[in-house]
Image (cartoon, grey):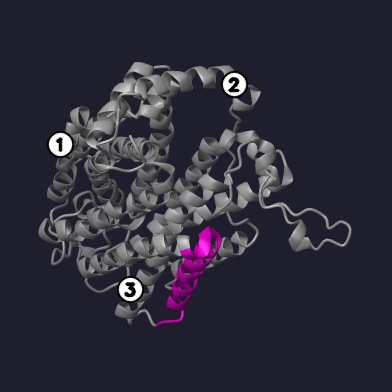
Amino acid sequence: MGQLGWWHIVVCVVVFPLKFPVAWHQMSIIFLGPSINYTCASNASLERCDAACTSWSYDNSTFATTITSEWDLVCLDANLVKLSQTIFMFGILVGGVLFGSLADKYGRRPPLVVAVIIQLVSGVATALIGSFWLFVVLRFLTAVATGGTMVTSFVLIMEIIGPKWRELFSVLYQIPFNLGHLTLAGFAYFLRDWRELQFALSIFSVLMLSYYWLVPESPRYLFTSGNVDGAVTVLETAAKRNNIESATIRNDIELYAKEKSRTASASDSKGNVLDLFRTPNMRAKTLFMCFNWFVCGLAFFGVAQYIGHAGGDIYTNVAISAALELPGTLLCIYMMKAYGRKKTLIFSNTLTGISMLVIAFVPQSASALNVGLASIGLVGMSISFPTVYLYAGELFPTVVRNVGIGTASMIARFGSMIAPFVAGFGSIAYWLPPCIFGLVPLVGAFFVFFLPETQGHPLPETLEDGENFGKRRAPTNGVSDAAASVENGKH
C-alpha cells in the first residue's frame, strides 16, 4: 500500500479531528471552574471565608455560571475544583492503560469506537447533572474514554504510516490538539454558562460515531493476530486508493507469514517493566526519560492553567498562549531533523524553565508581561511533548518499547495530576508556581545531557542492544573515549 498515499492521508484527515475533544476536555476546567471574585451574601459585614458565612454572592461580569458558583466551591472547598481536575487526569491514565490493553486484544478500531461513545454519553451527561460529585464521576468516565481515544488513534496512525513518514506524522498528530486548545477560548467566550459550554464541547463527538464505518482496522494488527485475510483486504483497498499494484499482496503476505513463523525465536519474546531497570545504563536512561515525561505533564498542563489565573482577560490570555503552541509544534519538526532529539529537548525545556523563572521577578501587576512569558513557556512544552514521544520510541529497545513508552506516559499523567495544585499555589505566594514550573524543566534539561542521541541510529532491538546503546567503553590501546563510544548495540 506504499509508505504514504491518498489512502493514508484520508485516514489521517478522518482520525486527526479526534484530538479536538481531547484538548477541549483536558483544558475545559480553565473555564468550567475559574477563579472568580465573591463576597459573603448571608452577612455583608463578615469576611467572605468567615466561619459564620453560609452563602456567597459571585461576580458574574465574566462568567454567567461556573461550577464554583453553582456548588459554592470556595473557602474550605476551593481545592475541590483542583481535585476534580486531578481525578480527571487520573482518568486519562486509566483510559490509556485500559484501552491500550483492549486495543492489543480486540484491535484498534473497536475500542476506539467504544471510547468515542463513552466520551459522548458521559460528556453530555456532565452538562445535565445537579451534583458536584456526580460531575466528578462523569468527568472521570469522560477522561477514561479520552485517554482511550488518544492511545488507540495514535497507535493506529503510527501503524499505517510508513517508517519514512512516522517522524513527521507523530508531530502533525499534535496539531489538532493545539487547534482544540485555541478554539476552546472561542467556545468559552460565546458560551459563558458552564453547562452550555460542557454540552457544546461534548456533542461534537457525535461526528466521531462515523468511525465505525470510516476508520479501517490496522492491517499490522490483523496480520500479527493471525487474521491474514483481513489484513489482505485492508491492504488491497489501500493499494487501489494509492494506485499501487495489488495483485501480489495476498501472496506476499502469506509468504511473509510463513517466513516469520519459521524464523520465530526466543528473541521475539517481549520484556516487562522490570527489564527497564535491570541493568545500569538502561536504568539510568529510563529514569532520565521518565522524568522528562513528568516535566511535560506537569509544565504543559500546569502552565496552561496558570495562565488562567494570571490576571487580565482570561479569554485573550488562553487564546494567545494556545495560538503560540502551533508554531512551536511546527518548529519541533524542523528542530528534530536539523539538530536531533537531544538538543531539541534541552532547548525546549530550557526555554520553558527560564521564561517561567523570570515571572517570579516580574511584578504581579504586570499581567500582560506575565502572560507573555508563560506563553513562551508553553511554546517550549509544545516542542518538548512531541519530542519525548519520538525520543522514547527510539531509545527503548523493541522488546520493551511499548512498556517503556507506557511507563513514561504514566509518569507524565502523574505530573498532570498535580499540576492544578501547583498552579493554585499562587494563593500562598505569587512567585511559587512559576518557580516550580521553571525549575523542574531545567532539571529535566540537565538529565537529557546524559541521554544518547538517537537520530540516524538503528533502533535497538534486544535488551542487550538497549543496554549498550549510548554506553561508553573504556579506552583500549590508546583509543580515545570518543572513538570507543558505542552508539548502538549493533556494530
> Few, some or many C-alpha atoms within 10 Å of disc 2 (few <14, some 14-19, many ≥20)?
few
Residue at x-position 46% and y-position 49%: 389
Magenta stretch encompasses residue 265 = no
Q: Residue at x 31, y 49 (%)?
A: 26
Q: Which residue is mark 3?
A: 371
Q: Residue at x 43, y 27 (%)?
A: 101
The quadrant holding residue 104 is top left
Which of discs 1 and 3 lies nearer the camera? The answer is 1
Amino acid at the residue labelled 2: Thr
Instruction: Determine the main secondary structure of the stretch shown in magenta.
Output: helix
The quadrant the C terminus occupies is top right
Q: Secondary structure at mark 2?
A: helix
Q: Is residue 343 magenta?
A: yes
For marks 3 and 2, the one nearer the N-term is 2
Image position of 173 with respect to 314: above or below: above
Which of label 1 and label 2 is nearer to you? 2
Image coordinates for residue 243, horizontal then vertical, percent:
24, 36
For the record, the magenta segment spans 338-362
**Label 1 sits on residue:** 206
Closer to the N terminus: mark 1 or mark 2? 1
Work out whether mark 1 precedes mark 3 in sequence or the reverse, and give the earlier one: 1
The crowding category of the residue bearing disc 3, from other C-alpha atoms within 10 Å (few below 14, some 14 to 19, many at least 20), is many
Indicate the position of residue 84 as horizontal and vertical percent values: 34, 46
Q: Amino acid at mark 3?
A: Val
- The residue singled out by tag 2 in the image is 263
